[in-house]
Amino acid sequence: YDVYGAPVLTKSARLRGVTIVLHDVTEQKKLEQVRKDFVANVSHELKTPVTSIKGFAETLLDGALQEAQLAEQFTEIIWKESDRLQTLIADLLELSHIEHAHFALKLTPVVLADIVDEVKTLLLAKAEEKDIHLSVVTDGDTTIEADPQRVKQILLNLTSNAIAYTQPGGQVTMTIQEKEDHVLLQVADTGIGIAAENLARVFERFYRVDRDRSRHSGGTGLGLAIVKHLAEAHQAKIAVESMLGKGSTFTVTFLKKHR
Ligand code: ADP
């Protein structure tokens, strides 16, 4: 609490009492803490690849360049770490952009099946590389009022996660389901699943159930935070159901405003 005190005086300037104002700053402090944690997280996430890039470049200059095999191996690491840095910066810029007060969606009628097909085309190679079967279930020409670029981003993030967190031989399905007053966009996988105690936190920035696994698959820990923001900007709800070892289903529920 912030505390302010002021004396209350009678007409003859005698002290009658004291007024005390208690100002609840819990919420303010909480926000401040979230901001500090975010800066600490960003700094840490940036530091890790930079340290690695610098270290391997130094080793190359110190002589490793002379050994073809080492040189190739280290250059590969430098390339991978720069790539991860680039993804991280792109995700941070995207998050900062959509969190900006002036961020506005470009709403237009969107045929969801078109977006689902686009995302399938984009991710098919990645799925095949891992021997994951990527399929689509649509019910025709379901149309919603939305920002097509942003819906695509939502679906890309959810589906890349589904591929990343599913073992070879698994199945990833994108589904569109039209109900009376809403439309469901679902991404289901038969992957590693998420334990109940971690489920509520997966939409937090930088939260990862398994940090090494996420890093290994090129994750930044920001994908679902971006999804949540974009869904909310559409007044859509995002939900997740999961069972450890069985798989996960992420559902975005769009309201049909224009009927
Ligand atoms: P990341 O870049 O680490 O994938 P996200 O914000 O996209 O970050 O996801 C946060 C965490 O949620 C992941 O690190 C992972 O632990 C978990 N997660 C997300 N999607 C799935 C999924 N389909 N199956 C299992 N775990 C998932």
Image: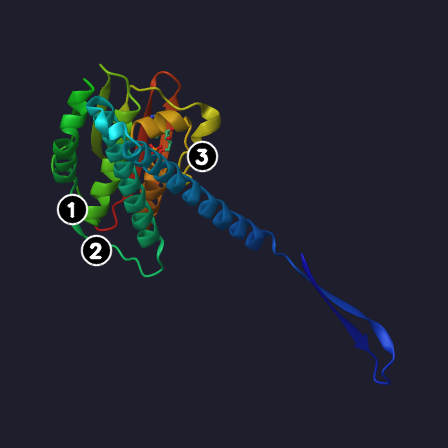
In the displayed structure, 114 sits above or below 39; it is above
Q: Secondary structure at mark 1?
A: strand
What residue lies at 31% left-to-right and 50% top-to-bottom? 93
Nearer the observer, disc 3 or disc 2?
Answer: 3
Query: Circle 3 is placed at which residue position?
Result: 201
Residue type at tag 3 = Arg
Residue type at tag 2 = Lys
Query: Circle 2 is placed at which residue position?
Result: 106
Q: Farthest residue toward the bottom?
A: 12
The residues bearing labels 1 and 3 have C-alpha atoms spaced at a distance of 30 Å
The reply to whether callout 1 and callout 2 are in contact (CB within 8 Å) is no
In the displayed structure, 126 sits above or below 14; it is above
Nearer the observer, disc 1 or disc 2?
Answer: 2
Q: Secondary structure at mark 3?
A: loop
What residue lies at 86% left-to-right and 76% top-to-bottom? 15
Query: Circle 1 is placed at which residue position?
Result: 110
Please indicate, yes or no, whether residue 64 appears anywhere in the rendered image: yes
Quarter of the image with the N terminus in it: bottom right
Could you tell me residue 87's position as x and y percent? 27, 40
